[in-house]
Image (cartoon, rainbow, N blue to C red):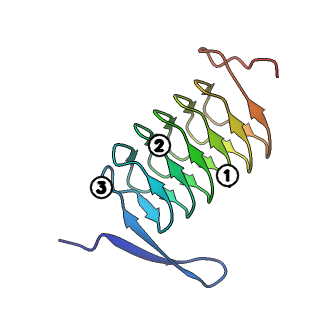
Amino acid sequence: MGKNYVDIENDLGETLRYRKHVNGRGLIAHGAKVHPSAIVDSGAYVEPGVQIAAGAHVGRGVWVESGAIIGPDAEIAPLAHIGSRAAIGAGAKIGVRTQVGTDARVAVGSLIGDDEIIADGERVATDRRGLRLAA
């Protein structure tokens, strides 16, 4: 049986330890909180200070930067990038290769399509079809 952690050196020369999440084998940094019922797929990286709630699903190759919050039952599709301190509301869906900027907020139940870019600090809410609602 292989080890359940990986050590990775960041750009500042610091070594960060990531453990493999029991549901999906994605890499979770020390200091991140991931609910046991959440799924973090292989190839995903969850940085320190991140909180991932019950029932959330983080797809393959997703990068969740430090301090981000992923709400209950949210779905993050493969290869998406969630910026530092961003918040994804309960039940929201983030599309493939979508980028959510630093300090951005995606409202509860929102549907964000593939290849979209949500700017730093932007607030987004959509209807069930993914059409943006007025702020």
Spatial CA span between label 1 and label 2: 17 Å
Q: Amino acid at mark 3?
A: Val
The residue under label 3 is 22
Figure quadrant of residue 28 = bottom left
Name the residue beneath numbered marker 2. Answer: 53
Image position, residue 85 (x, y; %): 68, 52
Q: Name which residue lies at 73% across and 20% down.
A: 132
- Which residue position holds label 1? 83
Q: Position of residue 59 (x, y in %)?
A: 45, 44
Q: Residue at x 34, y 49 (%)?
A: 36
- SS at badge 2: loop
Mark 1 or mark 3, which has the lower sequence index? Answer: 3
At 64% from the left and 42% from the top, the residue drawn is 87
Q: Which of 133 and 115 lies nearest the eye of the viewer?
A: 133
The three-letter amino acid code for the residue at tag 1 is Gly
Where disc 1 sits, the SS reads loop
Label 1 to label 3, Cα distance in Å? 24 Å
